[in-house]
Image (cartoon, helix red, strand yellow):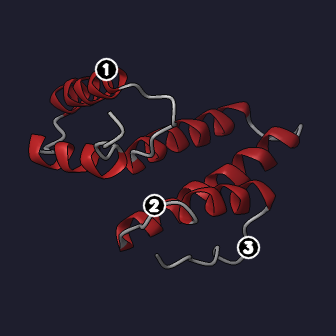
Amino acid sequence: MTILDPPSGLAERGRLFWSAIAGRYELAVDEVELLTEVCRSLDLADRLADDPAANPRTLLLVRAYLGRSLAQLRIPDGLDSPATARARTAGAARWAADTGDQTSSRAQRAAMARWHPARDDA
């Protein structure tokens, strides 16, 4: 597995998140780009939260963007049981249907297989 160096300009929180994800998963090119934006958004959210002059709405928008971007990465939190993973997939499918997202069930299954590989310890 190739370990990717973090992009330049990341602050502490962005670098830590980069290291946690890039050091654990093999990422496709589009996932690397998305991870880069997530890390930059984490740093921006920290700067906005620490700035008393910052518009609170801007922080809310950054956090919303961050939540959507993290969902797109589909990184498991390590706490998912198989039932929770299925529920999350079903919720994502409902969200896709409501928003017009054309992500196929085949693509969703591929993502689940990637992030939640079957375990042979049973």
Q: Dot 2 corresponds to which residue?
A: 34
Number of residue marks:
3
Where residue 67 appears, x then y in whole percent? 51, 38
What kind of residue is marked 1? Ala
Instruction: Identify the residue at image location x=73%, y=73%.
Output: 9
Q: Is residue 3 left or right of residue 45?
A: left
Residue depth check, mark 1 versus mark 2: number of the one nearer the observer: 1
- In this rendering, the answer to whether 122 lies above or below 48 is above
Q: Helix, strand or loop at disc 3?
A: loop
Q: Residues within 10 Å of mark 1 (few under 14, many from 20)?
A: few
* First in residue order: circle 1 vs circle 2: 2
Where residue 29 appears, x then y in whole percent? 37, 73
CA gap, disc 1 and disc 2: 27 Å
Instruction: Identify the residue at image location x=62%, y=53%.
Output: 41
Q: Which mark is residue 9?
A: 3
CA gap, disc 2 and disc 3: 16 Å
- In this rendering, the answer to whether 29 lies above or below 100 is below
Q: Identify which residue, 77 or 7, lies in the foreground.
A: 77
Q: Which mark is residue 11?
A: none
Q: Which mark is residue 83?
A: 1
Instruction: Identify the residue at image location x=68%, y=38%.
Output: 59
Instruction: Identify the residue at image location x=77%, y=46%.
Output: 46
What kind of residue is marked 2? Leu
- In this rendering, the answer to whether 20 lies above or below 120 is below
What kind of residue is marked 3? Gly
Q: Identify which residue, 86 or 117, lies in the foreground.
A: 117
Q: Helix, strand or loop at disc 1?
A: helix
